[in-house]
């Protein structure tokens, strides 16, 4: 960990740099010794207070406590001197604030990483809303002694895990508490805490051309446990409904037939797709919802043992083929009990993909349907249905087979990318490739020597002539190549940092380097055979 100390005239700044972020510890100037004099530790622009205390202590005897100033947009930690005190010093930890997509929302809402709460009165009390966890709770009262024996320590902090509250003050001699809350960044944990079990989602009206779609997209972590053409008219003005096989179960689509009439409108009931224990003990966990698909001259599906059907949808691009076959005007067949016994209350969604998604893919990974959702460098992906922070033209309704939808999983929707990728949530980086693993490892000859220009070298040397360590060929840092290298058995390029000669040059093997920012590449001393 790097540590750099900057001493200013007003406050002391200590910068701690880690691999992922920069936090700053800000120390305010010593206040005067008068009663209620304040020391302020103010975070730089873009950072907010995530911890605040009276560094000099003596709360209850010489200090009135600490608080995060509610008028500062979360940027100022304040320590207050008490009657008879010799001055107070505020100490703040500052962290970068950012926005996160709300996993419970179908409207691309964004959540603040940190929020601030404030309460003042005879018994002030605050608590973080669902989906947030407290990072600090501060207390203060201008009347010395009001905080004694109420869980407030000598730094003006109420420890996390205790109620952020101060009882038994008065309207005249008030107390005050402030809290900083941080959003739960783990999507699965956030969904478990915050999101409702079932969410109704209605898609926008379709166009009135043939095969136009209305898409009802479930939030991330949900699947469509029920799907219908809300506008009806299946068999006359609609081709039916289906749960998109490429969406992982999260998209209900209604199809317009293109013969006049109002647009088609999709309606989905979206349910959280959690894992449940296998009562037979064969598998550790089972998905609460599973999915089936059949297409052809006589399509048919039935639920596996242990599951019960929740919906069966039908569609055909040829108007009239669903008539007199048990399909109602909403595009589904009535549910029927498929098995005499079932083990638990998990139900089945009977219209989805015909094989489970693997979290790996070969080639250009256009068929990848797994749930990797961050780039090479660990930046979270932007939802495909979102236009923030980056605008794009990938509309799930226009790319129904591309695997994009109301999620932020890595995809290669056009098939033109070198591998799976995504738009990022970093406003300064529009897109980047994802670290999706390969399903198969090609057989590679691995001689530790090579003749000629060594273009056929497939060994594991990863140190250059000058002793520099080689950079991974598929990564863009610390040096971004001019050429977009991809896995290619013909050149030996892959997810590794071994010396290669990918362009068949006469000068031999080489690699990009990671040790010297001024030396972006160097030759390798691969032995001649």
Image (cartoon, rainbow, N blue to C red):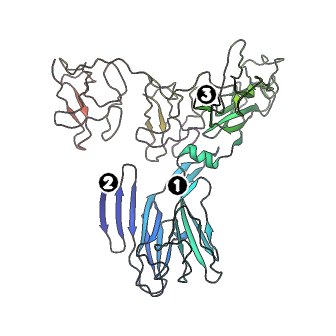
Q: Which residues are drawn in magenta?
A: 373-393
Residue closer to the observer: 377 or 2: 2
Q: Which residue is mark 1?
A: 113
Rendering quarter of residue 275: top right
Name the foreground residue: 426 vs 56: 56
At horizontal 57% and vertical 29% (from top left) the residue drawn is 403
Q: Residues within 10 Å of mark 3 (few under 14, many from 20)?
A: some
Instruction: Name the image quarter holding the C terminus.
Output: top left
Q: Give me the residue at 39% from left, 21% from top.
A: 441
Report which residue position mark 3 lands on. Answer: 400
Q: x, y percentage for residue 469? A: 24, 37
SS for tag 3? loop
Q: Which mark is residue 1?
A: 2
Q: Earlier in the sequence, mark 3 or mark 1?
A: 1
Q: Which label sits in the foreground, 3 or 1?
A: 1
Outermost residue to the right: 324
Q: Is residue 387 visible?
A: no
For mark 2, does the 10 Å Cα neighbourhood hold few (<14), some (14 to 19), or many (20 or more) residues? few
Labels in figure, total: 3
Vertically, is 225 above or below 63?
above
Q: Is residue 58 left or right of residue 460?
A: right
The answer, for residue 279, to whether it is visible in the render is: yes
Say which mark, if any, is on residue 129.
none
Which numbered disc flags the more N-terminal residue, 2 or 1?
Answer: 2
341 magenta-colored: no
Q: CA distance from mark 3 to mark 1?
A: 33 Å
| Residue 288 locus on image (x, y percent) | 65, 33
**Label 2 residue SS:** loop
């Amino acid at each position: 960990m790097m540590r750099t100390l900057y001493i200013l005239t007003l406050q002391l700044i200590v910068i701690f740099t880690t691999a992922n972020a920069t936090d700053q510890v800000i120390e305010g100037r010593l206040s005067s010794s008068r009663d209620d004099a304040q020391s302020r530790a103010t975070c730089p622009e873009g950072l907010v207070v995530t911890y605040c205390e009276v560094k000099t202590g003596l709360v209850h005897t010489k200090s009135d406590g600490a608080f995060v100033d509610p008028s500062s947009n979360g940027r100022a930690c304040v320590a207050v001197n008490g009657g008879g005190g010799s001055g107070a010093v505020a100490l703040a930890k500052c962290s970068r604030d950012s926005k996160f997509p709300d996993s419970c929302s179908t409207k691309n809402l964004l959540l603040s990483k940190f929020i601030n709460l404030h309460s003042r009165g005879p018994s002030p009390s605050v608590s973080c809303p669902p989906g947030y966890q407290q990072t600090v709770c501060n207390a203060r009262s201008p009347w010395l002694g009001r905080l004694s024996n109420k869980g407030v320590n000598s730094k003006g902090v109420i420890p996390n895990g205790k109620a952020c509250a101060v009882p038994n003050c008065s309207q005249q001699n008030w107390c005050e508490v402030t809290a900083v809350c941080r959003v739960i960044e783990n999507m699965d944990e956030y969904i478990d805490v915050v999101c409702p079990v079932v969410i109704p989602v209605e898609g926008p009206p379709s166009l009135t051309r043939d095969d136009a779609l209305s898409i009802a997209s479930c939030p991330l972590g949900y699947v469509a446990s029920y799907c219908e053409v809300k506008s009806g008219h299946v068999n006359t003005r609609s081709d039916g409904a289906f749960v998109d096989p490429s969406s992982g179960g999260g998209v209900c689509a209604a199809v317009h037939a293109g013969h006049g009439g109002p647009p088609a409108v999709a309606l989905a009931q979206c349910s959280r797709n959690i894992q449940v224990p296998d009562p037979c003990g064969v598998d550790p966990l089972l998905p609460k919802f599973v999915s089936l698909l059949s297409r052809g001259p006589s399509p048919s599906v039935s639920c596996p043992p242990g599951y019960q059907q929740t919906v069966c949808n039908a569609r055909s691009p040829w108007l009239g083929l669903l008539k007199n076959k048990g399909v109602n005007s909403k595009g589904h067949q009535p549910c029927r009990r498929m098995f005499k016994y079932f083990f638990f209350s998990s139900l089945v969604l009977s219209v989805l993909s015909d094989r489970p998604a693997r979290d790996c893919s070969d080639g250009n990974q256009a068929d990848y349907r797994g749930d990797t959702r961050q780039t090479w460098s660990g930046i979270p992906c932007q939802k495909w249905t979102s236009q923030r922070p980056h605008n794009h033209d990938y509309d799930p309704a226009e790319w129904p087979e591309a695997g994009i939808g109301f999620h932020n999983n890595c995809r290669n929707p056009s098939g033109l990318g070198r591998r799976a990728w995504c738009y990022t949530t970093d406003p300064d980086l529009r897109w980047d490739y994802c670290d999706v693993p390969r399903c198969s490892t090609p057989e590679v000859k691995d001689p530790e020597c090579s003749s000629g220009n060594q273009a056929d070298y497939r060994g594991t040397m990863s140190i250059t002539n000058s002793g520099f360590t080689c950079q991974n060929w598929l990564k863009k840092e610390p040096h971004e190549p001019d050429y977009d290298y991809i896995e290619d058995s013909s050149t030996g390029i892959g997810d590794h940092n071994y010396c290669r000669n990918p362009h068949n040059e006469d000068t031999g093997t080489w690699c990009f380097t990671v040790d010297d920012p001024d030396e972006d590449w160097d030759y390798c001393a691969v032995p001649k055979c």
